[in-house]
Amino acid sequence: MHAYKLDQPERLRAHLALQHRLYEVRDDGQGGQHWQVVSAQDFSAFEPAAEPPPFSAKSFFFAERELLFRFDGGQFYSALPAVVPQVLFGLHACDLQAVAYQDRFYAADPHYQARRRATLLVGVDCLHSCTGGFCSIVDSGPAVREQSADLILLPRQDAAADWLLLVASEAGHAALRGLRLPVAADDWQAERSANQACVAAEQEPQQEIVDGIVSLNDGRIAAATWEALGLRCLGCSGCTTVCPTCSCYAPRDRLGAPDSMQRERVWDSCLYQGFQKEASGHNPSATSGQRVQRFWSHKFGDGFKAQFEAYGCVGCGRCDRVCPGGIGVHGVMQRVAQS
Amino acid sequence: MRVVPSICTFCGVGCGLGLRVEDGRVIGVEPQPGHPVSQGQLCSKGWATSFAIEPYKRLTEPMIKEHGGFRPASWDEALGRIAEEFRAALDQQGPGGAGVISCARATNEDNYAAQKFARAVLKTHNIDHCARICHSPSVAGLARTLGSGAMTNSIADIDVADLILVIGADVTENHAMIGARMLRAQARGATLVVVDPRKTRLARLADIHLQVRLGSNIALLNGLLQIIFANGWENRAFLEARCEDIQPLRQYLAGLTPEQTSAATGVALADLQRLALLYSHAKAAFTAYGMGITQFQSGTNNVIAVSNLALVCGQIGRPGTGINPLRGQNNVQGACDMGCLPNVYPGYQEVADPAVQAKFAAAWASELAQAPGLTSQGMLKAAQAGELRALLIMGEDPLLTDPDQNQVARAFAALDFLVVVELSLTETAKCADVLLPAAAFAEKDGTFTNCERRVQRIRQAIAAPGLARSDWQILAELAQRMGYPGMAWADAEEVFDEMAGLTPIYSGMTYAALDAQHGLQWPCDAAHPQGTVILHEQSFPLGRGRLLPVTQVAPDECPDVEYPFAFTTHRLHFHYGGGSMTRKSPLLERETPAGLLFMHPADALKLGLHDHQGLRVSSRRGYLETRVQLSDDVPPGTLAMPYHFQEAPCNRLTNSAQDPISKMPELKACAVRVEPLPPGQAPSAQAGSREVEHARL
């Protein structure tokens, strides 16, 4: 990777915002944080969030609700989204890993790919762990992988030093055209390794996650343990909604004038009883415990890891925050590791 | 994408959510991080908000019924027709000839407008709403023992309680964020006790579950008190300092024995003693209850019995304690606060008080009726008697949610004129003569008051579909046409300000103050500008708390040879009320069949029924067809049905026997029989619906 010195990340942001619709996570002043459009004239300070935003980048590509096609009684009309070139500025390594995961899942999906191809991803390394994160254990961060971003921002432990900017793709390289940046002589590889070690130390070993993954793959967990967890699952769909790698959707047909209809797809959740229920009434995941087991097997199962070359869990901890039953990733893995 | 902060509309908890808006529609929601009530979480209903309010299958223009069918009409024509028909009803029958049923899902501003319309325009106190069938006994019971009928403490008190007693409330399903908070409290060491005839999720997770016999609340609560007195476990210091004479209650209970209580409730002796000990010795016991206390003909006395227990043990007026009715709808607290009740003006100011009458007559520049009005059930009865001719229903679906559906249908059929203001074509809306399209909560500004008395802002995020309008705008326009100029508000804030000026418990509130800190809890006035988190810390509104002896009363209808099963009704986590909003979500709708009857496997074995078999369920009032779902959630001998489904409306079976004080009907208990349908025959939604069909004509 090429590395440049960047006196102000805001300069890069303004440069990219000239040619793209640029999004960054901003506080809403009410305790919330959202991806918001930032104009080229906006020079307010770029401060990478200490915590991952409530919503990952998932919905930029896999929309929570979107029209797939219309039918007017005689003919089908596709409804591919209209896209404009866009930049997601300041993505953490975990969320970029999740985008890479979704890229594989939706490799052949034209709706997803239309949006994805129009997007430049600007990642940012984390110098410190967020609360409850464990990217260093599932190998999704804190350093942004070269393959998962177009540009990577590297903040410095020394706040007075210039930021570094790593170019991770052709598209990233092209996007810098017109921006003069000095080449960095610093040993950024060593610096990133040191940052990584620092975050790993802050995250501690989290043995329950490590042990839980082993137990889960060994099939050593009693059905009763899963059912006890299942009793605490309200089926709210919060975890699957905020999970950056969850990719399931349901079709939704809306009937219009006689003989016409529209098909949407909407985010679905495998924690719903109806998710796998078949027309006969048979349900392969009939109990709540089976559904909880199935969900976590998708996140930590060796088979999925082999297929996607990464765990389905990127260690962001969002499920811990939204689960009313206290069975987000830490709640589950503690009980699973003990059983 | 814009995210507009708002409040969830699916129950009385009042969770903070952000509406995710794109291209003029709400495409999803997100929890508000750091919201004091929901702490960054939502339940399945909250997460499904975008489906509930989308334009698809919404009413978008006024409609007038002609020849049994609806045709579109302009606002001008529809409102003109309504004004004419209401005038005719009033001319014929006098001020008692018309009434309004307001809406616990609508905003405070809408509800304030509804009662002002009834009182200042129609000149009647015939104004009520669905609090009648959820917590009217709480208002009546706690008014008698404490002097104020709302949740005494706050949801955050759960965090500091060391014992949590839940009676007759399915909290994880219906008030999920409160249920979640209770589970977190249990995880940090609090003892969780659930009293419920059904084995609910929370009951299964609780430290103690008392599976009481349906309708034996007073026997249980009296029995616990008797054990407490017999052991000298009452809080003498509290009783001396804060309550009236304890002797009548003590003497009344002295005749009881724990054995009698055990026999009456079906709860083992040891469990009774354990709970009596734990509750009376807890440093802070948080008592929460729901419809399992109120929806009985003994509803008010049930509430008094809860109050007795809390007062005797001094479990009130401190952090982590309290008597905490869990309110069902997002703004049922607010609709009560706004005076959508036949006996009180906004802020519980009595209609019977001449000074109050004079205050409102002057403020509204209108003559006002002297006599209190009719309750919702009373209005339906009056309609059948030909005494009430015209009724306006705002956003409620009594045909599905009130007891004895056929009786409701007969009342609708007997009315000269029914106006329904709604989001979509509900069962009740189908019976209307004129149908008006309402704006949903994401389409208007206003406030909701949650069950802990917290008044919170909602904000317009998108335009209403078609010609739909806010309820208060509709009522204001109608008032104008009926010759009353006093409702010509410019916006929701102006309605709020007028209300706050007349309502002492809201008098310290403004939109700006509510915006600043996730709402304010009433009473909020000059003396409490930051609102009130815990009520009754120093004294009760009555001065001293009252301990009133109450007697166990069995349900009006108990199982017998003809109708051998006890029958109760409940809610499912995935649906809300009559399902008109939640059933628009393809995901929630997929979760459960449209109607089902829960039965213990032992009963099914005796009757030779298999899971999901079709059957007919009959009571003395009507019958329906549905499918059986075998479950040990219910005890043998007791059947349960959720009330969300028009295809199998369990309220066709329920009993309208009433609590004499609050007029609460006994929705929680009646008697039924079941008969299997022939093999292979699917249940029919039409079975038993003749009177409902008639009411639609």
Image (tube, coloured by chain):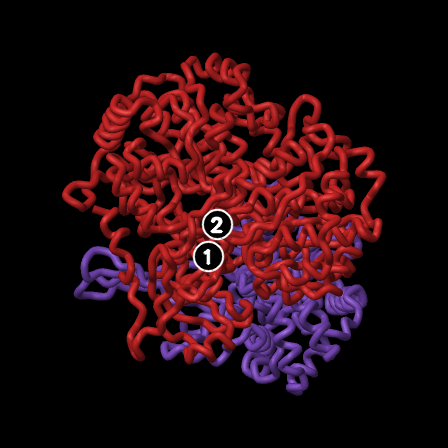
How far apart, in angstroms, are the residues tagged by discs 2 and 1?
A: 8 Å
Q: Say which quarter of the image contains residue A290.
A: bottom right
Horizontal side of residue A194 vs A80, given as left or right = right
Label 2: state its secondary structure.
Answer: loop
Residue type highlighted by circle 1: Cys
Q: Is residue B378 above or below residue B256?
A: above
Q: Which chain is red?
A: B
Q: Is residue A226 above or below residue B522?
A: below
Residue type highlighted by circle 2: Glu
Q: Position of residue A47 (x, y in %)?
A: 67, 49
* Mark 1 lies on residue: B670
Q: Which chain is purple?
A: A
Horizontal side of residue B453 vs A333, given as left or right = left
| Residue under the point 62% across and 61% down | B212
Circle 1 chain: B
Q: Is residue B623 above or below residue A46?
A: below
| Residue under the point 30% across and 77% down | B678
* Mark 2 lies on residue: B666
Front position in the image: B616 or B506 = B616
Circle 2 chain: B
**Tag 2 and tag 1, C-beta contact below 8 Å:** yes
Q: Position of residue B334 (x, y in %)?
A: 53, 36
